[in-house]
Image (cartoon, helix red, strand yellow):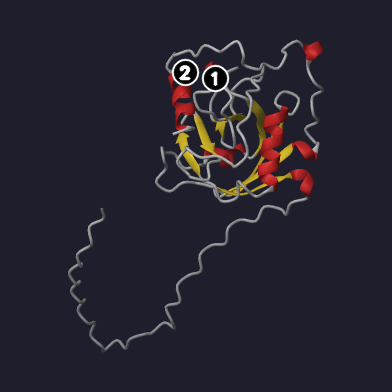
Amino acid sequence: MRFIASLFVACSALTGCLITMPATAQIVPSTVADRAPLPSMTDKENLLYLDLSTGGRVVIWLRPDVAPKTVERIKILARRHFYDGLIFHRVIDGFMAQTGDPKGDGTGGSELPDLKAEFNYLPHVRGAVSAARAQSDDSANSQFFIVFQPTLKLDKKYTVFGRVIEGMDYVDAVERGEPPAAPSKIVHAYVAADSPPGFTPAAAAPAADLGPAVTLPMSTPAKPAAKPSAPGKKKSLR
């Protein structure tokens, strides 16, 4: 149960349970003079596209200046099509939507090694994109969550590596649940620099072919409706 624990910790933070941070945790310098240059919001190498089943494209501005290893990991996995088809397996209204687990239950990750924490000064405000982890600071791998509402008690306890700059309404539309009954998913994930195709909405299901319409003569009496047949027994599932 690797990653389920991570956001149980996050939830406890919401109720006021603070998590002490080990002295070994890596923190990106908060002094302006010590910070790496801010990447441009138009630099396509640092824009991540998530095409969601909720109907549109989400654009995430990646921040390698504060979380270089985490951003590198996300881009590697996106370019391997790792995220294509993965569901949002844990979505809490007013808190966050979590995805990035190939198992779909919060316990999985990629075949790549876990990452060292890159806790930084970026806040967990609406639209923040942050790496999910287990109890260990250094256990982030492929999973991440997008914040619905400010949750500042998570600051410097989880690695914020980006921010939604377009399409947050498609994140808001993600199905809620732990897990959701009908989970929303990432249809495709792309790095903008790779010149991905534009977003294509899912095709609507074709209407059933009922054949040509038949008009009954006025003198023909309507037939009585047939009685419904008794439902068959369903095999019990064990």
- In the rendered image, residue 115, in percent from the top left (x then y), is placed at 63, 29
Q: Which amino acid type is marked by label 1? A: Leu
Image quarter where the N terminus lies is top left
Of 68 and 165, nearer the camera is 68
Task: Tell me the residue that label 2 is attached to.
Answer: 13
Instruction: Point out which mark residue 154 bears.
Output: 1
Is disc 2 placed on a helix, strand or loop? helix
Badge 1 local density, few (<14 within 10 Å), some, or many (20+)?
many
Q: Which amino acid type is marked by label 2? A: Ala
- In the rendered image, residue 126, in percent from the top left (x then y), is placed at 58, 27
What is the number of callouts on the image? Answer: 2
Establish if 138 lies above or below 102.
above
Horizontal side, residue 39 vs residue 178: left or right: right
Badge 2 local density, few (<14 within 10 Å), some, or many (20+)?
some
Establish if 56 lies above or below 90.
below
Q: CA distance from mark 2 to mark 1?
A: 7 Å
Is disc 1 placed on a helix, strand or loop? helix
Q: Earlier in the sequence, mark 2 or mark 1?
A: 2
